[in-house]
Image (cartoon, rainbow, N blue to C red):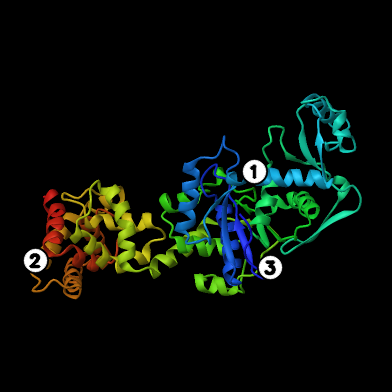
């Protein structure tokens, strides 16, 4: 793995650890990196940081790739796997050793434990102070285990001109001699990340601000190797509605959950994550094309964003209304088949597509859309929910008898003629239209809410509509 592009090309990367699903915060980080690269005509790379073999799983890798593809965050080149470059990481550690920028440390676990205990007694942060920094390795016992540590600078300060956080400085005396290579010869995360970013040609490191402290330590490796420093942009984390860091207790935190459990469209989540910590004036609805044209790091906020499910639902409702009827029917069919316990036929899928203009205006997600459509595919006698059952009591069976007769007399089955017939029943009965339409809705759909009742009559057709009304008309006779 080596950089093959010129220094002028922007290269960003997303580097998730495959220990679980694609977290909502990780998805936003990927999105910001993708947008920045696409805005500047550069490359967006994906690196799976799978060196922790005990926790990394193929299922997690698949979930990450699936989430990225669902959000249409396509990456350039092949997906890198950090574990494939362990020998390269070790090579750099030994090169640092040869340059005098690192040293073999033979401190024992007992010595480290004693140092931690002393720091705790003195109520100060623990920082490794190894005598081996300035000692010759020849003083060690032959074949004694050792780690390779970086010689952190002790004087002055390290400064990062962060594109989000601004100028941030740390006194070098606060930095410790971090481990680069463990005693078993395996590299640490801190070393591997720096080597991989350099070898992949990464020019901009855009990541969560929980990595800001790591940047100061990682710069020690970069400077010791004489490598170009990347541009850093540390983005504030996403918080829950209560201001605490986003976690499972706030609900869904994985991209797959928003798709598979909450019925969110990818373009809605894309738009919402874009606006979560970044803005372009007062624009709320931002297309993918505009996002690529407008995105910059200057308008990423420094404060944590709060996840607002209602805002996401409103955005999702907008994108459902904008989506094509055929696409929505295809997406909703899977949910509907689960709800009714059978597959939809080709004719039923066509009916679902025809019904979309009436169904989608009132849905905030695919679940509501699907639940609102199930009445089209249920078999008689129709089961009714509690609210609908209440609408079928009292005078309702008598009104439904009159409605049935009026509808049977229609010369043509159109929404206009059906409305005239139902209005006629309400006028003759001396009641408001709603008192007639509500029991009719309950009889036709089994629910208290539905698309316009006259549209429902047309979607169900004459035969099915009359049969459903008759079921409720005769049941109470």
Mark 2 closeness class: few <14, some 14–19, many ≥20 residues within 10 Å: some
State the residue in front, 122 or 214: 214
**Do tag 2 and tag 3 residues touch (Cβ < 8 Å)?**
no
x and y, in percent, of residue 169 in the image: 83, 56
Crowding near pointer 1: few (<14 within 10 Å), some, many (20+)?
Answer: few
Nearer-N-terminus badge (2/3): 3
> Circle 1 sits in a helix, a strand or a loop, which is it?
helix
Please indicate whether residue 420 sits to the left or right of residue 356 in the image: left
User: Horizontally, is 21 left or right of 11 in the view?
Assistant: left
Q: Residue at x 16, y 71 (%)?
A: 421
Residue 408 image label: 2
What residue is shown at x 43% (from left), y 52% (from top)? 262
Find residue 165 and name its label.
none
Q: Position of residue 12 (x, y in %)?
A: 62, 61
Residue wearing tag 1: 87
| Residue at image location 89% in from the left, 35% down from the top | 135
- Gap between marks 1 and 2 measured at Cα: 81 Å
Q: Nearer the viewer, residue 144 or 230?
A: 144
Residue 265 appears in the figure: yes
In this rendering, the label closer to the viewer, 1 or 2: 1
Residue 256 percent across, percent down from the top left: 46, 50
Asked if residue 287 can be seen in this view, the reply is no
Q: Residues within 10 Å of mark 3 (few under 14, many from 20)?
A: few
Asked whether the beta carbons under mark 1 and mark 2 sit within 8 Å of each other, the answer is no
Q: Residue at x 70, y 51 (%)?
A: 194
Secondary element under disc 3, as helix, strand or loop, is loop
Q: Which residue position holds label 3?
A: 7
Name the mark nearer the viewer: 2 or 3: 3
Quadrant in which the N terminus is drawn: bottom right
On the picture, is 136 further left or further right than 431? right
């Amino acid at each position: 793995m080596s950089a093959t592009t010129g220094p002028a090309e922007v290269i960003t990367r997303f580097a998730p650890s495959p220990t679980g699903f694609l977290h909502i915060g990780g998805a936003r980080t990927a999105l910001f990196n993708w947008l920045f690269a696409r805005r500047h005509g550069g490359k967006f790379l994906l690196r799976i940081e799978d060196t922790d073999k005990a926790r990394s799983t193929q299922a997690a890798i698949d979930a990450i790739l699936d989430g990225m593809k669902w959000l249409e965050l396509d990456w350039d080149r092949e997906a890198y796997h950090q574990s494939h470059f362990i020998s390269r990481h070790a090579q750099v550690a030994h090169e640092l050793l040869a340059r005098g920028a690192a040293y073999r440390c033979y401190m024992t676990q007992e010595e480290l434990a004693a140092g931690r205990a002393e720091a705790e007694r003195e109520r100060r942060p623990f920082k490794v102070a190894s005598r081996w920094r300035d000692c010759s390795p020849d003083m060690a016992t032959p074949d004694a285990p050792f780690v390779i540590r970086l010689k952190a600078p002790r004087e002055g300060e390290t400064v990062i001109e962060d594109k989000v956080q601004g100028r941030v400085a740390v006194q070098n005396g606060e930095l410790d001699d971090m481990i680069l290579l463990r005693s078993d010869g395996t590299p640490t995360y801190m070393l591997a990340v720096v080597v991989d970013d350099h070898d992949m040609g990464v020019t901009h490191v855009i990541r969560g601000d929980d990595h800001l402290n790591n940047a100061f330590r990682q710069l020690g490796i970069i400077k010791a190797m004489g490598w170009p420093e990347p541009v850093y942009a540390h983005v504030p984390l996403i918080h829950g509605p209560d201001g605490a860091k986003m976690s499972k207790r706030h609900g869904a935190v994985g991209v797959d959950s928003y798709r598979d459990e909450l019925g969110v469209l990818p373009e809605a989540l894309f738009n919402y994550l874009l606006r979560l910590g970044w803005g372009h004036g007062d624009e709320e609805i931002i297309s993918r094309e505009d996002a690529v044209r407008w995105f910059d790091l200057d308008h990423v906020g420094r404060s944590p964003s709060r996840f607002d499910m209602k805002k996401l639902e409103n955005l999702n409702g907008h994108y459902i209304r904008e989506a094509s009827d055929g696409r929505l029917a295809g997406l909703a069919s899977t949910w509907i088949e689960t709800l009714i316990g059978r597959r939809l036929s080709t004719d039923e899928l066509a009916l679902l597509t025809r019904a979309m203009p009436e169904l989608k205006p009132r849905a905030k997600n695919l679940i509501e859309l699907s639940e609102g459509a199930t009445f089209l595919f249920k078999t008689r006698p129709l089961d009714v929910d509690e609210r609908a059952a209440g609408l079928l009591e009292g005078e309702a069976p008598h009104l439904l008898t009159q409605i049935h007769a009026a509808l049977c007399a229609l010369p043509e089955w159109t929404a206009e003629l059906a409305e005239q017939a139902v209005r006629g029943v309400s006028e003759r009965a001396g009641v408001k239209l709603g008192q007639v339409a509500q029991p009719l809705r309950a009889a036709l759909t089994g629910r208290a809410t539905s698309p316009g009742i006259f549209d429902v009559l047309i979607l169900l057709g004459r035969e099915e509509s009359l049969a459903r009304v008759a079921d409720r008309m005769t049941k109470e006779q």
